[in-house]
């Protein structure tokens, strides 16, 4: 339907409607702007979240557990997902919001132009009507004056007392007014005809044309809104395939979690390569008892001799002293070298050596590539002297060859250490297989596994073993701090005694002490698997609780008696 024919008299309403249409476009543009702001903020928050939970780390600190790798894969996919949200925002900003704002300005200009044309046409018609109305009013006045002069003339013409001059004068006035009325009539007729023609043109040509332009403008506005609605949806639709890939990547990462592989990594990371402790031999303490025929009395063997006899059966026990003094003694005994990683357990040492050999091979390959490049450059200089002096490259080539020889020497040293470690592990495995065929580990008791640290300034300890506690807030304790702990003027009272159940081979990197079979208990296990004890010589330290049989004294002093 055409606005020009159906709404010819609704100029003001169409003015309001077109203004409402432009306001609606701007309102929708505002909605799109807020939506893309939400997308941008959402993407920014997602990236900050990924950055928070995926900090930068060195290559050695990269996670190896499948659960960790999958989690970081999910973070990577989430980061890509955030990038797609940013693309959605950019697409909306470029193809929807910017387009709407530009089109809104065009609509305002076009609407203003059409309305101005409509107002000009209306003003011209109003002017024509005013001219017609003025001519009409003039014609009306002239007719009334002519009628009045006619009445005057007729009255004087019928009056016998009126003079001839008065009658002639009234007659002339009558003719004049009649002529003026006729002229006003003709002018009014012309103006009326002109107004009618202009009015017809106005309502049949000018206004329909203007209203048609307004209708076309409004329809184009509606079409533009539909296109931007589609663009709004397409901006989201375009990223759906990539977002689906991101989600598929997250699902794949979840499926990649392998609990058995993680368990194998734990074994690989912490395996020391040591053999489990063997069976402890039975130690017969009844050799010190000598009974008579049937009275069941114990012989009067002097106590000193019993102690000497007990001392002959030396109890090999790893007594762990959590003091810096003992650690110094340990390393003077072990004499570890950081270069060959001999301070590490065999399995960990083998891994470190393999890693170092790989690094050295990569460095060697770089030097080889550099040497080859320098040699090629030297050949070019020899063939084209104008490009450079070949002798200027010789010092660098010699330096590179020297570096290669050093690296090969380092690789050879590390490979010899690796062969040594692998040879020991092979012989140890053979011995362990032989022992497993003839002995079984006692049930019901497990020996703690020793774990070792690569930092020689730290104490070697097991996860369940207690070392002497460092003071809070002091990450670098004084070297004599632990010495003071065991060198008190007033020694702790004895509260019991203990004897070893079996040897403790898992602690071979700690000081191996020889002593009597009985130790004095001066502090009970605090729940961490270690008991504080004192040798007869007065030395104090901690022993694994699970490796000894403890007898607590009833008296506070608790002197130890040998039975």
Image (cartoon, helix red, strand yellow):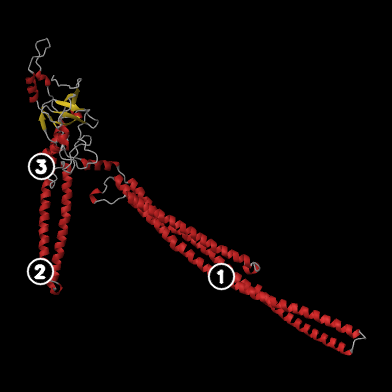
Q: Nearer the viewer, residue 199 or 233?
A: 199
Q: Determine which of the numbered discs, if any, sits on residue 391 in the image.
A: 2
Q: Is residue 277 visible?
A: no
Quote the CA–CA distance across marks 1 and 2.
83 Å
The quarter of the displayed image where residue 261 is located: top left
Q: Quadrant of the N terminus?
A: bottom right
- Where residue 552 appears, x then y in whole percent? 20, 23
- Mark 3 vs mark 2, foreground winner is 3
Q: Earlier in the sequence, mark 1 or mark 3?
A: 1
The residue lying at 14 percent from left, 60 percent from top is 368
Q: Quadrant of the C terminus?
A: top left
* 244 over 497 or under it: above or below: below
* 43 over 132 or under it: above or below: above
Task: Give left or right: position of 452 versus 32.
Answer: left
- Where residue 162 appears, x then y in whole percent? 90, 86
Q: Secondary structure at mark 3?
A: loop
Q: Secondary structure at mark 2?
A: helix
* 117 over 25 or under it: above or below: below
Reading the image, the residue beneath label 1 is: 112
Q: Would you call the spot at circle 3 few (<14 residues within 10 Å), some (14-19), or many (20 or more)?
A: few
* 122 over 497 or under it: above or below: below
Q: Nearer the viewer, residue 372 or 155?
A: 155
Quote the CA–CA distance across marks 3 and 2.
48 Å
Q: Are marks 1 and 3 in contact (CB under 8 Å)?
A: no
The quarter of the displayed image where residue 128 is located: bottom right
Q: Residue furthest right?
A: 160
Reading the image, the residue beneath label 3 is: 335
């Amino acid at each position: 339907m055409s606005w020009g024919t159906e709404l010819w008299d609704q100029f003001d309403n169409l003015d309001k409607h077109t203004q409402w249409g432009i306001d609606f476009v701007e309102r929708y543009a505002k909605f799109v702007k807020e939506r893309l702001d939400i997308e941008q903020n959402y993407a920014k928050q997602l990236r900050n979240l990924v950055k928070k939970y995926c900090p930068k780390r060195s290559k050695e600190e990269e996670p190896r557990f499948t659960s960790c790798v999958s989690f970081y894969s999910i973070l990577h996919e989430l980061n890509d997902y955030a990038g797609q949200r940013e693309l959605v925002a950019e697409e909306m900003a470029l193809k929807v919001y910017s387009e709407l704002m530009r089109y809104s300005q065009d609509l305002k200009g076009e609407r203003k132009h059409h309305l101005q044309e409509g107002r000009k046409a209306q003003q011209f018609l109003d002017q024509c009507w005013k001219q017609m109305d003025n001519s009409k009013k003039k014609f009306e006045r002239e007719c009334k004056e002519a009628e009045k002069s006619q009445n005057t003339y007729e009255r004087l013409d019928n009056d016998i007392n009126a003079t001839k001059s008065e009658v002639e004068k009234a007659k002339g006035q009558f003719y004049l007014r009649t002529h003026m009325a006729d002229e006003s009539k003709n002018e009014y007729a012309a103006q009326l005809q002109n107004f009618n023609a202009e009015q017809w043109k106005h309502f049949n040509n000018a206004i329909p044309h203007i209203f048609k332009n307004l209708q076309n403008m409004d329809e184009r506005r509606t079409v533009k809104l539909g296109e931007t609605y589609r663009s709004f949806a397409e901006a989201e639709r375009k990223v759906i395939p990539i977002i689906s890939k991101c989600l598929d990547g997250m699902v794949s990462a979840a499926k990649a979690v392998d609990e058995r592989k993680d368990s194998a990594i734990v074994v690989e990371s912490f395996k020391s390569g040591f053999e489990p402790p063997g069976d402890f031999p039975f130690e017969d303490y009844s050799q010190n008892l000598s009974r008579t025929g049937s009275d069941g009395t114990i012989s009067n063997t002097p106590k000193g001799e019993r102690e000497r006899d007990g001392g002959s059966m030396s109890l090999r026990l790893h007594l762990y002293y959590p003091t810096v003094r003992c650690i110094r003694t340990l390393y003077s005994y072990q004499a570890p070298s950081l270069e060959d990683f001999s301070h590490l357990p065999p399995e960990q040492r083998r891994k470190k050596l393999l890693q170092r050999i790989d690094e050295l091979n990569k460095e060697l390959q770089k030097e080889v590539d550099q040497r080859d490049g320098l040699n090629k450059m030297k050949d070019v200089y020899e063939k084209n002297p104008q490009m450079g002096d070949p002798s200027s490259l010789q010092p660098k080539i010699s330096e590179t060859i020297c570096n290669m020889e050093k690296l090969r020497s380092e690789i050879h040293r590390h490979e010899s250490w690796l062969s040594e470690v692998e040879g020991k592990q092979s012989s140890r495995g053979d011995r362990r297989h032989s022992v497993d065929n003839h002995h079984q580990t006692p049930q019901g008791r497990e020996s703690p596994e020793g774990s070792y640290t690569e930092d020689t300034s730290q104490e070697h300890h097991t996860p369940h073993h207690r070392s002497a506690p460092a003071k809070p807030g002091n990450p670098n304790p004084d070297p004599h701090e632990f010495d003071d702990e065991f060198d008190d003027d007033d020694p702790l009272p004895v509260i019991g005694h203990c004897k070893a159940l079996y040897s403790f081979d898992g602690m071979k990197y700690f000081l191996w002490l020889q002593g009597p079979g009985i130790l004095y208990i001066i502090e009970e296990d605090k729940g961490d698997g270690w008991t504080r004890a004192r040798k007869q010589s007065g030395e104090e330290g901690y022993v694994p609780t699970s490796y000894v049989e403890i007898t607590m004294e009833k008296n506070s002093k608790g002197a130890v008696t040998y039975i």
